[in-house]
C-alpha cells in the first residue's frame, strides 16, 4: 500500500488505525477506550494495562527467541565488544529490578540514571520499566548543576551511575560530578548505585553509595508488574525557553504501540534485522531507537560508545555497519558532516562491506542537502531526513520505507507520518497556503507516544505547546509545506538553538552569563557552524564598575558556562560590546543580531531604540 493510501487510512479512521496497531503489543488487561479526553489532555488506550519490559524481553523469550542477540555493545573507546542475548538481558534486568524492589523501589518511584553508553544503562532502564519505576536519564555531557536540577525536579529514590565516561581519550569522572550534584540538590536519594568501570575505579565516598555488584542480588527475581497505559515510563528533560529544563513525561501504552509500529513503517526493520541508532541514551533518539523500539520489535540493537570521528578514525560508522550487518542506521547530520570533513573522498567507506545496509536516516537538526547528497553518492543508498522532537518521541514527518519510498526532496523532511496532521499557521493562527513560511503546528489529538505532560508542572505543557493556537500543538519550529505535502523545517521560533543535534536554550546560557559579576547584560545567539550546525556565542555588556581585563572576563564566562551547563553546550566564545540593540520597550533584538552575525538578510525593526547599537553589531568580528 502506498504512502497516500496509508495516510488516508489513518486520517479517515484514526481510532481503528491505532486499534489495529495496538494488537502487536501484549496487554495484561485490554484498554477500555482507544482515545479518552480528560479535562486537559488526551489519553491513548485508556485503562489498559501492560508492561513495557515484558514486551521488550519476556515476550520474545516466550516466543523462542531468547538466544537472539538483543544488544551488540561496541566501544572503540575501551576496545570492548560484547553480545548480549535476550535471555542474558532478561536475567540482568530481573536481578536489578528485584534488587531495586527489595530496597523499596516501587511503581511510580523515580530513578535517575546518570550513565555512559554501557549495557548497564539499558539494563537499568528496563529494570525500572519492569517494576513501574520511572527512569529519568541525564546525559553525561551535562555539568553537576544541571544534574542537580534534574535530581531536584524528579526527587528520585535511587540514582544509578558509573565511575566514569570516556570521551575519546579523556576520562570523565562521573562520580565527582554526581557527588557535586548531590551536594547542590535539595533532594537526597536513599541510594546511589555506582557501576565501577575498570578504566577508573572511584571512591564510594558519599553517604548511601553502594557499588553495582554489591547492590545486585543475582538470586532475586521479579515478574513484570501491570502498569497502566497512561502511567509514566520515563521523564526526559529537554531545553525550554527558560533556564529550567522541561521534564517530558512519556507514558507506557502509547509509547509501546507507536514505537513498535515505527520500526516497520519508517525503518523497514523486521525481527531478524540489525538496527543502529548512533545517538546517546541521554537523548530521546537513544531512548526510542537504541533501547525501546528495537527491543519492542525483538531485533538486535547496537550500543556504540564512540564518536563518528576520532575514535579512532572516520571509518567507524562504516565498520560498525559492516561488522554487525546493519540494515538501517540512524544518525544526526552533524555526524555526517564530521565524517565528510575528514574523509571527503570516502576512502574509509571503501574499506567496508556495506551490502546489508539499506537506508540511513537523519534527524535532530536541519539536514543540509550537501551532506545528504554526499552520503548518497558515497554509499549509493537512500539517505532519509525525518523530523521529530523529544516531545513526540517518534517522527512527525519522514519517508516511510514500508510503503515504498517517495522521491526525496532535498531540504525537506518528507511528508507527515500517519498519525500527524501538520499545518502551517501565521502568527495570528490563520492557515497559510502551500509554500508560505509560518509556524508548524500539529492538529490535536497528538498520536500515541507523544507527551502531554511536563513533570511536576501540568500547566506548563498547556502554556508551552497548546495555548498559542487553539486545537493545535505548537512545535516551535518554523517551516513550509509544499503543494505535494513535503514539509521543510527551517528554524525554531523560540530561543532554542541546535548545536550538534542537541537542543540548547540560549536563555539558559544568558542566565549563567549574567551570574558573572562583571556582566551587566548579555545576548546569546546561535552562529552557523560548518560542523555543529549552530554554536552559541555570547555578547556581553560589562558593568561600569568592572575593572577586570576583557580577556579574563571572556575566559571566566566561557568556563562558567562549561561548569554550570556542561561541555555539551560547546560555548567557546564571548564578545564584549558597548551596548546591545533594543526596542524602545527595552527588548534585546536577538533575532536581528543573529541575522546580522550570520550574514543573513534582515530588516531594521521600526521599534529600534538606537541605530548606533546596530552599527556596533555590524562591525563585530567574531570568527
Ligand atoms: N559525557 C561527557 N562529556 C561529553 C559527552 C558525554 N557523554 N558527550 C560530549 N561531551 C563533551 C565532549 O567531550 C566535548 O567536550 P570538550 O569541549 O572538552 O571537547 C563537548 O562535550 C562537546 O561534545 P560534542 O558535541 O560531542 O563535540 P565534539 O567536538 O567532541 O564532536 C561531533 C563533534 C560532531 C563528532 C559530535 O558532536 C557528534 O558525534 N555529534 C552527533 C550527535 C548525535 O548523534 N546526536 C544525536 C541526536 S539525534
Ligand atoms: P530534540 O527535542 O532535541 O530532538 O530537538 C527537536 C528539534 O530539533 C526540533 O524541534 C527541530 O527544531 C530540530 N529537528 C529535529 N529533526 C529535524 C529535522 N529533520 N530537520 C530540521 N530540524 C529538526
Image (spheres, helix red, strand yellow):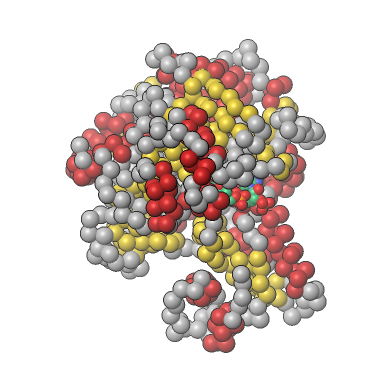
Q: Is residue 576 left or right of residue 250?
A: right
Q: Residue at x 66, y 17 (%)?
A: 217
Q: Position of residue 604 (x, y in %)?
A: 46, 82
| Total number of numbered discs in the rendering | 0
Q: Residue at x 26, y 46 (%)?
A: 406
* Front one among 570 and 581: 570
| 251 is higher (above) or lower (below) than 600 | above
| 263 is higher (above) or lower (below) than 454 | above
The part of the image, by quadrant, that contains residue 29 is: top left
Q: Position of residue 307 (x, y in %)?
A: 58, 43
Q: Is residue 606 left or right of residue 168?
A: left
Can residue 338 be seen in this snapshot? no
Quarter containing the N terminus: top left
Q: Position of residue 211 (x, y in %)?
A: 72, 26
* Front one among 322 and 330: 322
Q: Residue at x 70, y 71 (%)?
A: 519
| 465 is higher (above) or lower (below) than 94 | below
Q: Is residue 569 left or right of residue 205?
A: left
Can residue 492 be seen in this snapshot? yes
| 601 is higher (above) or lower (below) than 377 | below
* Front one among 326 and 380: 380
Amino acid at each position: 500500500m502506498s504512502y497516500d493510501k496509508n495516510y488516508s487510512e489513518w486520517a479517515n479512521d484514526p481510532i481503528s488505525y491505532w486499534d489495529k496497531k495496538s494488537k502487536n503489543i501484549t496487554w495484561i488487561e485490554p484498554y477500555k477506550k482507544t482515545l479518552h479526553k480528560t479535562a486537559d489532555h488526551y489519553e491513548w488506550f485508556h485503562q489498559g494495562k501492560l508492561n513495557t519490559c515484558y514486551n521488550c524481553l519476556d515476550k520474545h523469550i516466550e516466543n523462542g527467541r531468547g538466544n537472539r542477540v538483543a544488544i551488540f555493545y561496541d566501544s572503540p573507546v575501551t576496545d570492548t565488544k560484547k553480545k548480549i542475548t535476550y535471555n542474558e538481558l532478561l536475567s540482568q534486568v530481573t536481578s536489578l529490578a528485584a534488587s531495586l524492589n527489595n530496597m523499596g523501589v516501587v511503581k511510580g518511584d523515580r530513578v535517575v540514571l546518570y550513565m555512559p553508553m554501557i549495557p548497564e544503562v539499558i539494563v537499568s532502564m528496563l529494570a525500572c520499566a519492569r517494576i513501574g519505576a520511572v527512569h529519568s536519564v541525564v546525559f553525561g555531557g551535562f555539568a553537576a548543576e544541571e544534574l542537580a536540577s534534574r535530581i531536584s525536579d524528579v526527587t528520585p529514590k535511587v540514582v544509578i551511575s558509573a565511575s566514569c565516561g570516556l570521551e575519546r581519550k579523556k576520562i570523565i569522572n562521573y562520580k565527582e560530578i554526581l557527588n557535586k550534584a548531590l551536594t547542590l540538590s535539595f533532594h537526597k536519594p536513599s541510594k546511589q548505585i555506582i557501576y565501577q568501570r575498570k578504566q577508573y575505579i572511584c571512591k564510594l565516598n558519599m553517604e548511601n553509595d553502594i557499588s553495582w555488584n554489591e547492590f545486585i542480588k543475582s538470586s532475586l527475581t521479579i515478574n513484570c508488574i501491570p502498569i497502566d497505559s497512561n502511567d509514566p515510563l520515563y521523564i526526559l528533560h529537554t531545553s525550554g525557553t527558560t533556564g529550567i529544563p522541561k521534564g517530558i513525561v512519556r507514558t507506557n501504552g502509547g509509547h509501546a504501540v507507536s514505537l513498535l509500529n515505527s520500526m516497520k513503517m519508517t525503518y523497514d526493520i523486521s525481527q531478524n534485522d540489525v538496527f543502529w541508532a548512533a545517538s546517546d541514551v541521554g537523548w530521546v533518539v537513544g531512548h526510542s531507537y537504541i533501547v525501546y523500539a528495537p527491543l519492542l520489535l525483538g531485533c538486535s540493537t547496537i550500543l556504540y560508545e564512540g564518536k563518528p570521528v576520532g575514535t579512532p578514525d572516520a571509518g567507524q560508522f562504516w565498520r560498525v555497519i559492516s561488522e554487525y550487518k546493519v540494515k538501517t542506521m540512524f544518525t544526526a547530520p552533524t555526524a555526517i558532516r564530521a565524517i565528510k570533513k575528514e574523509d571527503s573522498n570516502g576512502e574509509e567507506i571503501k574499506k567496508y562491506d556495506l551490502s546489508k545496509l539499506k537506508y540511513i536516516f537523519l534527524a535532530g537538526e536541519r539536514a543540509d542537502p550537501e551532506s545528504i547528497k554526499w552520503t548518497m553518492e558515497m554509499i549509493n543508498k537512500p539517505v532519509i531526513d525525518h523530523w521529530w522532537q523529544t516531545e513526540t518521541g517518534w517522527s512527525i514527518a519522514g519517508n516511510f520505507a514500508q510503503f515504498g519510498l517517495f522521491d526525496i526532496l532535498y531540504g525537506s523532511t518528507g511528508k507527515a507520518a500517519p498519525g500527524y496532521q501538520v499545518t502551517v499557521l501565521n502568527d495570528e493562527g490563520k492557515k497559510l497556503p502551500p509554500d508560505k513560511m509560518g509556524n508548524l503546528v500539529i492538529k490535536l489529538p497528538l498520536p500515541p507516544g507523544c507527551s502531554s505532560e511536563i513533570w511536576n508542572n501540568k500547566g506548563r505543557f498547556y502554556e508551552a505547546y497548546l495555548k498559542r493556537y487553539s486545537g493545535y500543538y505548537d512545535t516551535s519550529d518554523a517551516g513550509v509545506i509544499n503543494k505535494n505535502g513535503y514539509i521543510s523545517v527551517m528554524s525554531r521560533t523560540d530561543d532554542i538553538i541546535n548545536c550538534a543535534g542537541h537542543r540548547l536554550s540560549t536563555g539558559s546560557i544568558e542566565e549563567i552569563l549574567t551570574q558573572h559579576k562583571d556582566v551587566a547584560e548579555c545576548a546569546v545567539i546561535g552562529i552557523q557552524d560548518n560542523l555543529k550546525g549552530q554554536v552559541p556565542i555570547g555578547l556581553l555588556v560589562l558593568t561600569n564598575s568592572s575593572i577586570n581585563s576583557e580577556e579574563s572576563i571572556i575566559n571566566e564566562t566561557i568556563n562558567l558556562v562549561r561548569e554550570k551547563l556542561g561541555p555539551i553546550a560547546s560555548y567557546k566564545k564571548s564578545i564584549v560590546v558597548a551596548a546591545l540593540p533594543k526596542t524602545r520597550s527595552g527588548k534585546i533584538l536577538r533575532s536581528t543580531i543573529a541575522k546580522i552575525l550570520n550574514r543573513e538578510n534582515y530588516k531594521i525593526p521600526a521599534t529600534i531604540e538606537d541605530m548606533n547599537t546596530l552599527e556596533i553589531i555590524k562591525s563585530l568580528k567574531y570568527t
